[in-house]
Image (cartoon, rainbow, N blue to C red):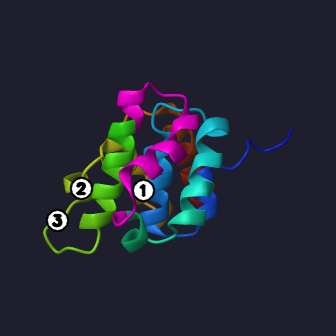
Amino acid sequence: MLPPPALLQERLGRDPWKIAVASMLLCRTHRRQAEPCFLKVLERWGAPELLARAELAEVETVCQPCGLRTESTRNRARAMTRMSTKWFSSSWEDMRELPGVGLYVADAVGMFVFDCYELDSNDGVLHGYAARATRKVA
């Protein structure tokens, strides 16, 4: 039997910002829609300081293929740029304090950067990955 395809976040090394942005795009979106958008985000704004200075309308255009309503696309683009703006500030201690970062994004960063498999979100894909990863370790 073939192993399940790797999650997008798994292929990003241990870069918490990239994993956060990818997860923000993947939230409520299929990978086949989110991954091309994420690759375009990296191509245009490959670091938090670049995405923080991006024009919101341009980020919205890149996010549009994720298949969301216009308002949702605008909110997601705004959250990604605001999160990137606050990324280097010292005004947050928990990722969930950053704009657009909820349980799913925080769990993805915790799992893929810090090997934390105790998840707070109810995302089935992340829970499945955590179960497989902890079986490998045991």
- Which residue occupies the extreme top position in the image? 69
Q: Quadrant of the C terminus?
A: bottom right
SS of the residue under disc 2? loop
Closest to the observer, 113 or 102: 102
User: Label 1, on which residue?
Assistant: 20
Q: Would residue 79 be visible to someone looking at this image? A: yes
Q: Is residue 44 magenta?
A: no
Residue 71: x %, y % from top left: 35, 29
Give the spatial CA distance, label 2 vs label 1.
10 Å
User: Label 3, on which residue?
Assistant: 92
Q: Is residue 64 magenta?
A: yes
Contact? badges 2 and 1 (CB < 8 Å):
yes
Residue 52: x %, y % from top left: 34, 65
Closest to the observer, 12 or 84: 84
Who's the residue at 38% across and 31% down the image? 72
Q: If you read the primary sequence from the N terminus, does the residue marked by circle 3 or circle 2 appear first?
A: 3
Which span of residues is magenta-colored? 52-73
